[in-house]
Image (spheres, grey):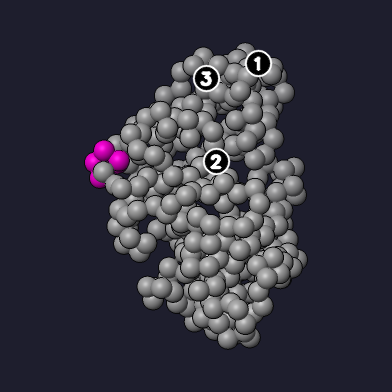
Amino acid sequence: MNVLGIESSCDETGASVVVDGQTMLSNVVASSLELHRFYGGVVPEIAARIHIHSIIPVIEEALQIAKMTWQDIDAIAVTYGAGLGGCLLVGVMTARTLAITKNKPLYAVNHVAGHVCANFITNTNLTDYNLPKNQPQFPLLALIVSGGHSQLVYYKNHFNYHLLGQTRDDAIGEAFDKVAKIIGLPYPGGPSIAKAALKGDQNLYKFTKARMPKYDFSFSGLKTAVLRLSQELIGEDHRFPSYMVSERLNLTQKANIAASFQRISIETVVDKALIAYQEFTPKSFVIAGGVASSQELRKQVSNRFPIEVLYTDPKLCTDNGAMIASLGYYQAKFNFGIADPYSLAINPSLSM
């Protein structure tokens, strides 16, 4: 079954053709990231406008690379939530129109669940992809960590899952972005902090972990602790404007803050995941989402977990159409989530 996946929940316009949820024939992504760097985060209106310009060329290129025509496509899968409203609207309206005009079934996909399904893609002829050799086995434990989501989910199958815990405030990726802005590192924060941390001492500053219910996360207090420490290092108190702090931090201070923050924030999610693994003893443990490409996360997990932890290629950790196409296939296979192309609505606050 050949599924075209369409993704437009944030600043990446993605389209991909995936066969039987497992074999990726194409994966085209157009990002507006460079336009958002100046603002230190994604500007929804800019992202939505770029989606309008990009989405048809991206879909056409995905079909071309897959060497397929519309006659070869069996179904269309599209992200309808969670995400930015204007961005989601572009993808959903495009998918609805194509489903009607090309007479294809349409499947509405949860973006967050799609990140998990990226790990089920194990084959491709595309170059420069390092994919898992085998698909995860159920029951599986998934740690989903990205700029918009931090969740711990226990799956019995693709559609029978239990949300164990999630962030009560900032997602971990969002916390990385905000801390990077405080100490004067460029957006996006994850790669910038990881690069700076290589020159820092991760044990120099003793940040504390938030005390939360068993499987929940919180990063707001940690972010504030970074700000207070930064103000202290430059000889100021809490009244000093946060946007002026970075100008007075030196490179060594920035590196040490980055390394210490990265270590403790990653430890926070790994601690919770390890507790869940010990309680549920799943057959597989999957890490999904943009932060899954973090080398610090992968190092901590490999050092602490007794089983092999599954990651996909970093290019499939961030938003893409392949993960949507893969989950769309399983929705079609098990008759789940078929949508009316005349009425499918976006759901920006969609949860697991």
| Residue 288 in the image, given as x and y percentages of width and height | 47, 48
| Residue 78 in the image, given as x and y percentages of width and height | 55, 69
Q: Mark 1 points at which residue?
A: 252
- Residue 92 placement: quadrant: bottom right
- On the question of residue 255 being in view, the answer is yes
- Residue 247 placement: quadrant: top right
* Above-or-below relation of 54 to 249: below
Give the magenta-colored segment's residue range: 276-280
How many C-alpha atoms fall within 10 Å of the one at disc 2: few (<14), some, or many (≥20)?
many
CB atoms at circles 2 and 3 under 8 Å apart?
A: no
Can you tell which mark lies on residue 293? 2
| Residue name at image x 68 percent, y 29 percent | 184
**Image quarter (top left, top right, bottom left or bottom right) of the C terminus:** bottom left
Q: Which amino acid does label 1 sit on?
A: Thr
| Residue 250 in the image, given as x and y percentages of width and height | 69, 17
Q: What is the CA distance from the residue labelled 1 to the residue labelled 3? A: 12 Å
Q: Mark 3 points at which residue?
A: 202
* Above-or-below relation of 335 to 292: below
